Every structure is written in C-alpha cells, then in structure tokens.
Image (cartoon, rainbow, N blue to C red):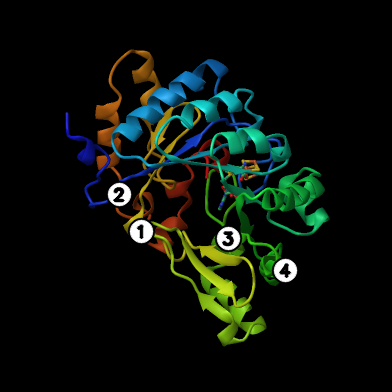
C-alpha cells in the first residue's frame, strides 16, 4: 500500500484534502436546475450508507490527509440520523461544514454548534417569493430567508449560493450584493452547470464576465475591492467598500478552477466521484460491506482523475450532450 501522502495525490500533482459527503438523495425542495421535474430514481434504502459506514469511510480519507468534510445532499438535514452523523464526524480532526437549503435549519442550531459546525452554505436563488417558488417548485421562501438572517444572528459563518439563469434571476445580482451591505454574509453567484435532466444550455448561463459587467455598471470602480481568494478556493471574491459582507463568482463553466482542485465526492450510496463533471464512479460501499480495504479503489479513482472537468476541457465539449448526460443529476451527487 502506498504511503498516506500519496493515496490522495493524483497524476497531475493535486492532493485531495477535501471530501464532500452526500447524505441523502431526497430533498424538501425541487430546484429545476438540480433535478428533473419527474424526480430521480432513488437508491433502495439498503444501498445507502448507514451512519457507521459514513464514519468508517470518512475515517479512511482522514487517515490519508483529508482535513475538510462538507455534508450535502439532497437536503442533508432531512436525514433522520443527522444528529448522530454530526456527532460521529465531529470526533474526526476535520473542519466540518454543511450545505443546506435552510428550510428547517432553525431546528438544528444547537446540534450544529455542539459539533463545531460553523460554516453553513445556503442555497437561495431569488429574493422574490414568487420566483423562489417557481425555481424550487415549493413555497418556502419566507422560512429560508428568515433562517438565513437567524443563522447570521446566531453567529454562523454564512455563504448564500445563487445559481444565476438568464431572464430568471440575472436582474437580481445587485439586490443580492446589497444584502451584503448590512449582513456579514458572502453571496456566491454560481454559473449554471450541465447535469442529467436539468435542460442546461449555454445560453441560459450567466457568466463571470456578465456578473462583473453588471457590477461595474452599478458601482464605481473604486468601490469594488478584489479580495484574496483562499488556497483551493473555487470562487473569485470581491467586496463593495464599506459593506459588511462580500460576494463571489464560481465560474466552473467559463473559468474552471481544476488546476487547484482538492475535492472528492462521496455519494449517499457510497460511490466515490473524482470530479463533479465526470460520470465515472467507484463503489466504495460494496467493498466496505465485503470487509475489504477501500484504499486501493480510492487510489485508483484518484489516479483516474482527469486534468480538467472530467475531460470536458473546452466549452465545445461541455456543450456536447453526450459528454455530460451520463452524469447523475446534481441532487444525487451533492454539489
Ligand atoms: N440541498 C442543499 C442546497 O441546496 O444547498 C445541498 C445540496 S445542493 C445539490 C448543493 C449546491 O449545488 C447548491 O448550492 C445548488 O445551488 C448547487 N447546484 C445544484 N445544481 C446545480 C447546477 N446545475 N449548476 C450549478 N449549481 C448547482
Ligand atoms: Fe434540493 Fe439543494 Fe437540489 Fe434545491 S439545490 S433541489 S434544495 S438538493
């Protein structure tokens, strides 16, 4: 077996210290960009990782250098055993965080705090109740908005993720940035990405360049500060001078950040994905249940990681449906 340092090192020199674990394939919202209207084929319950299995797999990754774990889904907080999952993972020496739609997060403040989970990413694609309902196919805007403000009040570090789509919410870019005037949140504009069943096409996407054009048509050049991005950051970070919060753009489509990618993804049914854009998966759960070491499969998966976006290294390739349509819907990957 290779030494710890090498197991998570790929052939392009990238070390993977960040594991995203999807806890569930189901959700209490139905965002159009994330899942098809008819829903997704769910794995039978027996094929999903139990909390013990999540812990065992996570432990192996930590042994080999993972220092950061983010829980996602589906909606991670609707998993019944989320308290015990948080408790178990909190015993590992990692920075533990969560991505949630925040619909029911107010029931979890104590348990999140007790387990050292301070960094919360929340999806919110519109500040308009009717538009929120349209995109999520559910009427939960008021709860989500109220919970974001409560999270801030409770002292959590909050990032708000908004997937921008032309003609839908691109007229709200400045409204989102204005939220950062009084609240210390980071609003992150995400370029709409292609996944199975989400009817993606390039013309619906709002690019990094377009966001910045909108920003410079509203704010003076001297008001817009470029912030230092953290190492391995997927976002380009900015701030309006004097505002409490900041904003950022995640440009996976027009400006991929693959060179510094340090992420691996574990799906709720125990499959390791070496890249968000790759349809390839490695079955860790079957191996674990067979009582065998999962390390050789992890190593093989990491070494198979392609340099850029699962092989879709140009915008032309990204637009070829046959190259991205075999990938799961985002709801079953965990963004
Ligand atoms: N339910 C939680 C939530 O919505 O935050 C966690 C899971 S969700 C799949 C994680 C992130 O993936 C969200 O921020 C969502 O906006 C993002 N996402 C889903 N589909 C996407 C797409 N097609 N393009 C870009 N981001 C997407
Ligand atoms: Fe659910 Fe999050 Fe996907 Fe929306 S983006 S359907 S909230 S998993």
Q: Give the residue number, with chain letter if any, for mark 2.
A: 306
Q: CA distance from mark 2 to mark 4?
A: 38 Å
Q: Is mark 2 within 8 Å of ligand 1?
A: no
Quadrant location, the N terminus: top left
Secondary structure found at label 4: helix
Q: CA distance from mark 3 to mark 2?
A: 26 Å
Give the mark nearer the N terminus: 4 vs 3: 4
Q: CA distance from mark 3 to mark 1?
A: 24 Å
Secondary structure found at label 3: strand
Q: Nearer the viewer, residue 135 or 94?
A: 94
Q: Is mark 3 within 8 Å of ligand 1?
A: no
Give the mark nearer the N terminus: 4 vs 1: 4
Q: Give the residue number, with chain letter if any, for mark 4.
A: 175
Q: Give the residue number, with chain letter if any, for mark 1.
A: 313
Badge 4, how many Cα within 10 Å: few under 14, some, many 20+?
A: few
Q: CA distance from mark 4 to mark 3?
A: 13 Å
Q: Nearer the viewer, residue 12 or 236?
A: 236
Give the mark nearer the N terminus: 3 vs 2: 3
Secondary structure found at label 1: loop
Across and down, in percent, residue 58 comes to 40, 30
Could you tell me if residue 260 is visible in this image? yes
Query: Is 298 displayed left or right of 240 in the figure?
Result: left
Q: Give the residue number, with chain letter if any, for mark 3.
A: 188
Q: Is residue 263 above or below residue 248?
A: above
Q: CA distance from mark 4 to mark 1?
A: 33 Å
Across and down, in percent, residue 241 comes to 60, 78
């Amino acid at each position: 077996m290779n030494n710890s340092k090498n197991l998570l090192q790929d052939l392009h020199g990238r070390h993977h210290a960040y594991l995203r674990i999807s806890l569930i394939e189901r959700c209490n919202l139905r965002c159009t960009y994330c899942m098809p209207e008819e829903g997704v084929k769910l794995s039978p319950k027996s094929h999903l990782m139990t909390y013990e299995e999540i812990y065992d797999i996570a432990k192996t990754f930590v042994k080999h250098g993972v220092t950061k774990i983010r829980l996602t889904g589906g909606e991670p907080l609707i998993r019944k055993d989320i308290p015990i999952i948080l408790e178990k993972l909190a015993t590992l020496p990692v920075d533990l965080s969560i991505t949630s739609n925040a619909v029911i997060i107010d029931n979890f403040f104590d348990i999140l705090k007790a387990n050292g989970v301070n960094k919360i990413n929340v999806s919110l694609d519109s500040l308009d109740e009717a538009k929120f309902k349209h995109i999520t196919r559910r009427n939960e805007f008021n709860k989500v908005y109220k919970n974001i403000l409560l999270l801030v009040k409770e002292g959590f570090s909050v990032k708000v993720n908004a997937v921008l789509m032309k003609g839908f919410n691109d007229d709200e870019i400045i409204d989102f940035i204005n939220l950062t005037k009084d609240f210390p949140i980071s609003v992150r504009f995400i370029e709409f990405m292609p996944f199975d069943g989400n009817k993606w096409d390039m013309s619906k996407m709002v690019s990094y360049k377009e966001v910045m054009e909108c920003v410079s048509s509203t704010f003076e050049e001297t008001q817009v500060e470029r912030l230092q991005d953290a190492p391995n950051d997927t976002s380009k970070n900015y701030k309006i001078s004097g505002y409490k919060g900041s904003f950022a753009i995640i440009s996976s489509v027009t400006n991929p950040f693959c060179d510094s990618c340090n992420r691996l993804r574990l799906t709720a049914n125990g499959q390791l994905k070496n890249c968000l854009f790759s349809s390839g998966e490695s079955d860790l759960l079957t191996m674990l249940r067979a009582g065998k070491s999962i390390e050789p499969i992890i190593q093989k998966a990491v070494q198979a990681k392609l340099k850029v976006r699962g092989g879709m290294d140009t915008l032309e390739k990204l637009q070829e449906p046959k190259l991205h349509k075999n990938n799961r819907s985002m709801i079953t990957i965990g963004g």
